[in-house]
């Protein structure tokens, strides 16, 4: 069973930076894409950033120019560098991996890491 373990969350002030990491239990070459989602209290989970097997990236508009998703194929990790953090970036951040097996779309989730940005 695939396991994803996030780390790097914390409490920061407006304008500061954080770097989140997600360690996969298997080679990330197994995945078609990996992503970071976030969920604020009382809100739905939203896609923040996505990176494909080939390295193409996409971002939600609210983080473009501030966040960067990257992956390290040797270490089987995906990271999210978050700069110029704002209070509205506060939430639980989850790592996600997607792949196809037996003709079915499958995904795995980490347990999440909390990011809190104070004003």
Image (spheres, rainbow, N blue to C red):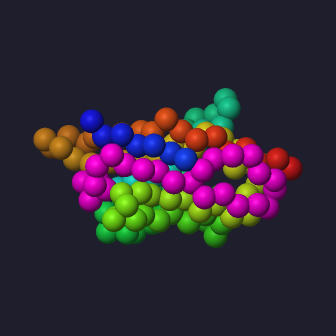
Q: Which is nearer the eye, 51 or 44? A: 51
**Residue that protrudes farthest toward the left in the picture:** 102
At x 28%, y 55%, the residue is 27
Please state if 6 lies on the left or on the right of 75 as rendered: right
Residue 39 sits above or below residue 81 on the image: above
Q: Which residues are magenta?
A: 8-32
Q: Is residue 32 visible?
A: no
Please check the rendered image and state whether residue 45 is part of the magenta-colored stretch, yes or no: no
At x 77%, y 51%, the residue is 12
Give the x, y percent position of residue 118: 82, 47
Residue 84 sits above or below residue 20 on the image: below
Please state if 10 lies on the left or on the right of 54 as rendered: right
**Residue that protrudes farthest toward the top in the picture:** 42
Please check the rendered image and state whether residue 22 is part of the magenta-colored stretch, yes or no: yes
Displayed quadrant of residue 102: top left
Give the x, y percent position of residue 62: 65, 58
């Amino acid at each position: 069973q695939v396991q994803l373990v996030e780390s790097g969350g914390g409490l920061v002030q407006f304008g500061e930076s954080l770097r989140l990491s997600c360690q996969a239990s298997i080679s990330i070459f197994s995945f078609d894409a990996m992503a970071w989602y976030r969920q604020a209290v009382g809100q739905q989970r939203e896609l923040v950033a996505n990176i494909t097997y080939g390295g193409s990236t996409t971002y939600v508009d609210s983080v473009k120019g501030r966040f960067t998703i990257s992956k390290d194929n040797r270490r089987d990790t995906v990271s999210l560098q978050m700069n110029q953090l704002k209070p509205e970036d506060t939430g639980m951040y989850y790592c996600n991996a997607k792949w196809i097996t037996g003709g079915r779309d499958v995904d795995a989730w980490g347990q999440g890491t909390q990011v809190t940005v104070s004003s």
